[in-house]
Image: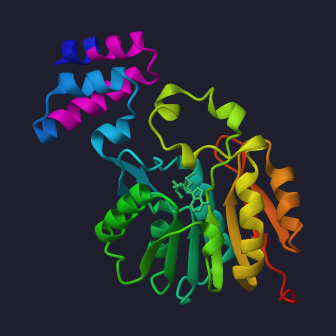
């Protein structure tokens, strides 16, 4: 068995796959558990298909999420948004209303609905393929009665919310071309490409926060490396307050925490 694993890891390494040994081990376990042909799985990984698409799932906030082509694979740094929302809303029993802009797999919204047993949530995404996975995941976690998804542009959102969360596409068009092939060639462009400077989504989302947050409501927004001042200025331009910028575990400022002041209509 060891030589099968070693041989597979060598082939992945030769194809410039990072974490070759760990990937080979995950794929071997997946093949054995599901009666699949390990060779076929390794060939897919040699072609740089992400492990999570091959196995069909990914962990986020210690919950299991179904994923596949057409939806962004949840990233560990996005858990910073969950932590910050928990920090700002200490009373877990409140019947809060949550909104997730660009819900993708639904990982953020589902993680927070699990933490707030009386909250309800709406997830918006422009991608039908992404929403397919969000619907699967909300059923998997038994939250269908507290969560609904809508296929729409986020500009069309209505209603008032205690918490708005978003991990929008924020990679600049110039940088998107230089992403690793695992990401660039497999994950959806609409989830990655944030236009010139990577800030297009924040310009669209800032007025939505101004309009659709309740007074004193909060927002948690994911940002890319070096974007906190630019994104922060766009948000403040709507009369909103930046409470803090919080780093992820790698030390990169990853989450803007925003509050709508009490007096603002
Ligand atoms: C970076 S992904 C985030 C997915 C998920 N929230 C997560 O954190 O893993 C951004 C998502 O926003 C969606 N999106 C991009 N532009 C949009 C728009 N104008 N209206 C609605 N959804 C949009 C994409 O389809 C994608 O699913």
In the rendering, at what x and y percent does residue 48 appear?
A: 40, 25
Q: Residue at x 40, y 34 (%)?
A: 50
Q: Residue at x 47, y 31 (%)?
A: 185
Report whether residue 199 is seen: yes
Rendered residue at 75%/80% (across/down): 211
Vertical order, 180 against 254 (above or below)? above
Is residue 53 rendered magenta in the image? no
Q: Main secondary structure of the magenta part?
A: helix
Q: What colour scheme has been applied to the protein in the rendered image?
A: rainbow
Is residue 15 rendered magenta in the image? Answer: yes
Q: Quadrant of the N terminus?
A: top left
On-image quarter of the C terminus: bottom right
In this rendering, would 175 be left or right of 183?
Answer: right
Q: Residue 122: image x %, image y %? A: 51, 76
- In the image, is residue 83 above or below residue 214? above
Residue bounds of the magenta highlight = 8-31
* Place of residue 7 in the rendered image (x, y in percent of width and height, measured from the top left): 26, 11
Give the number of marks: 0
Image vertical order of residue 219 relative to residue 264, above or below: above
Outermost residue toward the left in this view? 35
In the rendered view, tell whether residue 201 sits above or below residue 99: above
> Is 184 displayed left or right of 17 in the figure?
right
Q: Quadrant of residue 224?
A: top right
Q: Quadrant of ligand 1?
A: bottom right
Residue 240 position in % (x across, y down): 84, 73
Identify which residue, 58 or 158, lies in the foreground.
158
Indicate left or right for 248 with 25 as reference: right
Residue found at x 46% / y 63%: 106
């Amino acid at each position: 068995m060891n030589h099968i694993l070693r041989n597979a890891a060598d082939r992945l390494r030769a194809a410039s796959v990072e974490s070759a040994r760990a990937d080979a081990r995950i794929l071997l376990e997946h093949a054995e558990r599901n009666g699949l042909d390990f060779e076929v799985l390794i060939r897919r990984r040699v072609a740089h298909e992400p492990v999570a698409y091959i196995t069909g799932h990914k962990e986020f906030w210690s919950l299991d999420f179904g994923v596949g082509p057409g939806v962004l694979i949840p990233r560990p740094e996005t858990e910073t948004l969950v932590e910050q929302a928990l920090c700002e809303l200490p009373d877990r029993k409140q019947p809060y209303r949550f909104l997730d802009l660009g819900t993708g797999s639904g990982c953020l919204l589902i993680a927070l609905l699990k933490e707030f047993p009386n909250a309800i949530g709406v997830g918006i995404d422009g991608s039908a393929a992404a929403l397919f996975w969000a619907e699967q995941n909300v059923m998997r976690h038994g939250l269908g009665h507290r969560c609904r998804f809508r296929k729409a542009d986020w500009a069309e959102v209505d209603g008032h919310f205690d918490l708005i969360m978003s991990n929008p596409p924020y990679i600049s068009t110039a940088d998107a071309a230089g992403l690793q092939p695992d990401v660039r060639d497999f994950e959806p462009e609409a989830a990655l490409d944030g236009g010139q400077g990577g800030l297009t989504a924040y310009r669209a989302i800032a007025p939505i926060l101004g309009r659709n947050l309740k007074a004193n409501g909060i927002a948690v927004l994911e940002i890319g490396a070096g974007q906190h001042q630019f994104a922060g200025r766009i948000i403040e331009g709507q009369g909103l307050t930046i409470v803090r910028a919080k780093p992820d575990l790698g030390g990169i400022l990853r989450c803007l925490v925003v509050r709508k002041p009490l007096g603002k209509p």
